[in-house]
Image (cartoon, grey):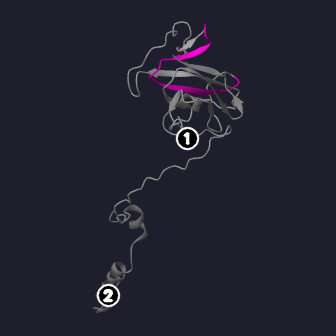
Amino acid sequence: MKRNLPWIPAACTALVVLVSCGGEDPDTLTNNPPPAATATPTPAATATATAAPTTAPTNGTPPPQTGGEEDDNFGPVATVFTRVFVVRDKQGGEQIPGQFEDRFPGTPYYNESTNNEMVPLGTFFILDTTPKNAEGKKCQADRPPQWVVDHGGKFEPLADNGIGTNKFQYRANARAKGIVTVYTLIDGVRSNIINVQIY
């Protein structure tokens, strides 16, 4: 006797529909994960440069680098050395070599016989003062130097009374013959006293 099984094709169809509509097969997800969603790239924001804050140098932390050798060594300041740094025929002009450079390297304008730093009349010159630590190395200072220059009209100071952007240098023209005594104070330490002779 032949049985009619009309429900078998319907059941198979339902089973296929259930498998195809029932969601993702976990094994398929594990072996073939869906591609990661890709976001449309957005342009990066342009950074605006801001100046770094400047702080007064202290002996505990390095100051902002200015390119000088002094920045490499910590204080405190133990000694201060002042000298005539350079002499030129005019501001921005040719350097006039010191007469005593062979005998006194680093202080080419110092004349031992007079104990004076020699600067010709009518020239431009720069005085320089350098703080040094206990090891004798150029070092950081907590404050800029105080220049003591009673020039009495013999110097014609440039910029802000001879002191420009580099506070450790004093710039002037030699305007009258005579001797001017100069020294500086850095962090309470007095430099050597020099006599600048305009001749």
Residue nearer the viewer, 32 or 192: 192
Rendering coords of residue 23 (x, y %): 39, 77
What residue range appears in magenta?
A: 113-134
In the displayed structure image, the side of residue 98 where residue 75 appears, left or right = right
In the displayed structure image, the side of residue 117 where residue 44 appears, left or right = left
Residue 168 lies, with reference to residue 41, above or below; the image says above
Circle 1 SS class: loop
Amino acid found under the numbered disc labelled 1: Pro
Marks 2 and 1, how far apart in space?
Answer: 88 Å
In the displayed structure image, the side of residue 112 where residue 46 appears, left or right = left
- Which quadrant of the view contains residue 193? top right
In the displayed structure image, the side of residue 178 where residue 13 appears, left or right = left
Q: Say if mark 2 contacts mark 1, CB within 8 Å.
A: no
Q: Which residue is mark 1?
A: 64
| Residue at 49%, 13% in the rendered image | 98
- Which quadrant of the view contains residue 104? top right
Residue 140 lies, with reference to residue 117, above or below; the image says below
Q: Residues within 10 Å of mark 1 (few under 14, many from 20)?
A: few
Residue nearer the viewer, 86 or 195: 195
| Residue at 32%, 81% in the rendered image | 16
Rendering coords of residue 91 (x, y %): 41, 28
Label 2 vs label 1, nearer the camera: 1
Amino acid found under the numbered disc labelled 2: Ile
Circle 2 SS class: helix
Q: Which residue is mark 2?
A: 8
| Residue at 62%, 12% in the rendered image | 115
Q: Residues within 10 Å of mark 2 (few under 14, many from 20)?
A: few
